[in-house]
Amino acid sequence: MSNVTNLTRFRKDKARAEKRAAGDANAAKFGRSKAQRQLEEVQAEKARITLDAHRREDAPPQ
């Protein structure tokens, strides 16, 4: 005789696996580590400072 399969449990397990796979795909696509975020913040700040250092101060119009 064959084993009895609980279809509700099977359906829920399949949904969990699909949700986890979608989450893993999103993490690989959009996720960044804390170190990467901090590095990008530092680089953006350095770029802003460099840009401000090259800004010209024109005389006010008379």
Image (cartoon, helix red, strand yellow):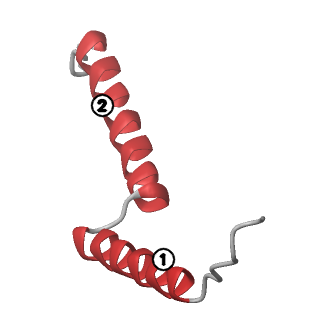
Tag of residue 7:
none
At x 37%, y 44%, the residue is 23
Give residue 7's position: percent from left, percent from top.
31, 12
Q: Which of 55 and 27 is in front in this view?
A: 55
Q: How far apart are marks 2 and 1 (CA)?
A: 45 Å
Q: Quadrant of the N terminus?
A: top left
Tag of residue 48:
1
Left or right: residue 59 versus residue 11 is: right
Q: Nearer the viewer, residue 17 or 53?
A: 53
Name the amino acid type tagged 2. Answer: Arg
Q: Quadrant of the C terminus?
A: bottom right
At x 69%, y 68%, the residue is 60
Picture mark count: 2
Left or right: residue 29 versus residue 1 is: right
Is label 2 or label 1 in front? 1
Q: Which of 5 and 27 is in front in this view?
A: 27
The image quarter in which residue 45 lies: bottom left
Few, some or many C-alpha atoms within 10 Å of disc 1 (few <14, some 14-19, many ≥20)? few
Q: Would you name the residue on which mark 2 appears?
A: 16
Give residue 48's position: percent from left, percent from top.
48, 76
Name the amino acid type tagged 1. Answer: Arg
